Image: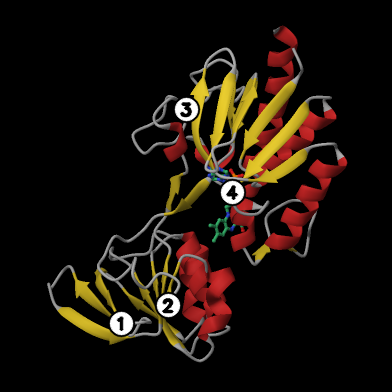
Amino acid sequence: MEKKVIIIGAGPAGLTAGIYTSRGGIKTLLIEKFMPGGNMLMTEKIENYPGFPEGIGGIELAELMKKQVLNSGGEIIQGEVKDVNIGDEKEVILKNGERLKTPALIIASGSSRKKLGVEGEEKLKGKGVSYCAACDGPFFRDKTIAVVGGGDSALEEAIYLTRFASKIYLIHRREEFRASKFLQEKIKEYPKIQPVLSSIVEKIEGENKVESIIVKNIKTGEEERIKVNGVFISIGQKPNVEFLNGKLKADPSGYLIVNENMETSEKGVFACGDVIRKTLYQVITACGEGAIAGWSVEKYLSSL
Ligand SMILES: Cc1cc2nc3c(=O)[nH]c(=O)nc-3n(C[C@H](O)[C@H](O)[C@H](O)COP(=O)(O)OP(=O)(O)OC[C@H]3O[C@@H](n4cnc5c(N)ncnc54)[C@H](O)[C@@H]3O)c2cc1C
């Protein structure tokens, strides 16, 4: 049997797995629905990936990893995986109807931003509602915006957006931000950021673009209309597993369960990166797990 592997997703996990499998002499095909890089493309600067003491742009790091896959002999195609069939041979079905067969499969489909699920969000997506500060920040020069969320990403994004926006309401449902103490202290250095705590966004208003939001204080029940030009939603991630249709064992939130070799509940199917259940969701851990998944595929294919 030809030694080959299909990797679904070309974020840092999939790209690293691809470097390992192609260097291991395995015919490697990565399928990516958007662009190689995954969530690194949403990060203006990555400051905690070793080897870059001054930090490195997310897009730049993505480009370097992509080049390394191609230089190692891997192939990357654009396509969205819609379904998979898992047996001794695995079948990957793309949105365009194409069907690809492989003895080994790596799921590296990562995670996406959670939606707020409020009225106006879907209608005004791309018209002031954004899930990516690094992508859309420059559109909000001298504008008033809201950032919704209280974790590290939300606070980092609020700080980043001070470069463009004139005022930022940082809205969080709890009394205190969930972000690290370091970031909680740091936002105090930015007078443009106004925390709005114990509050939720109930509605996003506007005809063709965001004009205002209705914010409710959950302690007092009071509602307020705040005029804003944009809303950045940063309330966490969810794993991209829809295309698996429950065929692999996952935790209640959908994160895939793997062992230390990145093996999933099905033989010959491996998973790595933000799509798996783990404790630290970062580029460095995604790469580490990608390397293990690639190495495990090599061992698996040799055992057949
Ligand atoms: C705003 C933001 C800032 C961050 N900042 C940092 C930071 O400073 N340092 C750090 O270490 N980490 C940071 N992270 C986290 C880091 O980006 C992730 O942990 C990492 O990208 C996970 O890699 P991954 O390859 O598992 O998944 P992803 O990067 O999510 O890549 C998965 C890829 O799979 C593709 N895909 C999904 N479904 C399909 C499908 N059905 N068919 C085909 N392709 C599919 C996606 O398009 C995507 O390209 C940040 C994340 C965000 C959102």
Q: What whole-number distance in Å separates the C-alpha atoms at marks 1 and 4?
A: 31 Å
Three-letter amino acid code of the residue under disc 3: Ile
User: Disc 4 or disc 3, which is closer to the eye?
Assistant: 4
Q: Is the distance from the Cβ of mark 2 to the nearest ligand 1 atom less than 8 Å?
A: no
Tag 4's secondary structure? loop
User: Disc 2 or disc 3, which is closer to the eye?
Assistant: 2
Residue 114 visible from this viewpoint: yes
Q: What whole-number distance in Å separates the C-alpha atoms at marks 4 and 3?
A: 23 Å
Q: How is the image coloured?
A: secondary structure
Mark 4, residue position: 33
Mark 4 / mark 2, whichever is N-terminal:
4
Mark 2, residue position: 128
Label 3: how many residues lie within 10 Å, few (<14), some (14-19) or many (20+)? Answer: many
Three-letter amino acid code of the residue under disc 4: Lys
Three-letter amino acid code of the residue under disc 1: Gly
Mark 1, residue position: 206
Q: How far across and down, in percent of the image, does residue 220 sit?
A: 13, 73
Tag 3's secondary structure? loop
Q: Is the distance from the Cβ of mark 4 to the nearest ligand 1 atom less than 8 Å?
A: yes
Three-letter amino acid code of the residue under disc 2: Gly
Mark 1 / mark 4, whichever is N-terminal:
4
Label 1 with label 2: CB-CB less than 8 Å: yes
Q: How far across and down, in percent of the image, does residue 17 sit?
A: 71, 34
